[in-house]
Amino acid sequence: MTPALYTDIALNRDVPEAGLRCGMVATFIDRVPHPQGGEEGAILEVFSVSGETIAVVTVPLSSIEVLRDDDVLSVQRLMVGVGAVSGE
C-alpha cells in the first residue's frame, strides 16, 4: 500500500549511506519512476526531534511502510560517521 503524500512512514530496512535505520520515521514526499523501469522510488524527508531536516533520500517503495495504530515511536540516533548531527 502506497501512503498518501506528506504523511509519516516507517523505514522497514536500514539505509546506511544516509545514516538511517529500520524503524525510523520519515515523511513521504513523492514517488519517482525508476529510470530503467525497475521498482518505483519514494522520496523521504527525515527530521530531527527539533524539526530540522536531517536527510532527504530516495529509497525503493518497498523500503517503507505505513504507520499503524499499534506502532510506538522511539528515539534513534543517526548511524555514526554518516550524516551525523553534531552538538553532543
Image (cartoon, rainbow, N blue to C red):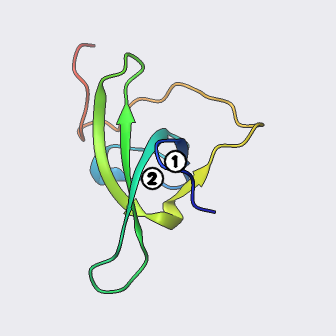
Question: Is residue 8 depicted above or below 33 in this figure?
Answer: above
The percent position of residue 88, horizontal first and vertical second, equals 28, 13
Question: Is residue 86 depicted above or below 79 in this figure?
Answer: above
User: What amino acid is found at the position of numbered circle 2 in the picture?
Assistant: Asp
**Residue closest to the eye, 40 or 62:** 40
Q: Quadrant of residue 37?
A: bottom left
Kindly report the distance in space between the C-alpha atoms of the residues bearing marks 2 and 1. Answer: 5 Å
The percent position of residue 56, horizontal first and vertical second, equals 29, 45
Q: Which mark is residue 65?
A: none
Quadrant of image for the N terminus:
bottom right
The percent position of residue 61, horizontal first and vertical second, equals 48, 65
Task: Please tell me how crowded label 1 is: few (under 14), some (14-19), or many (20+) other residues with Cα within 10 Å.
Answer: some
Query: Secondary structure under badge 1?
Result: loop
Q: Residue at x 29, y 33 (%)?
A: 54
User: Quick one: label 2 or label 1, which is nearer the N terminus?
Assistant: 2
The percent position of residue 15, horizontal first and vertical second, equals 38, 53
User: What amino acid is found at the position of numbered circle 1 in the picture?
Assistant: Cys
Q: Which mark is residue 14?
A: 2
Q: Residue at x 30, y 23 (%)?
A: 52
Q: Quadrant of residue 72?
A: top right
Residue located beneath label 1 in the image: 22
Question: Is residue 42 depicted above or below 26 in this figure?
Answer: below
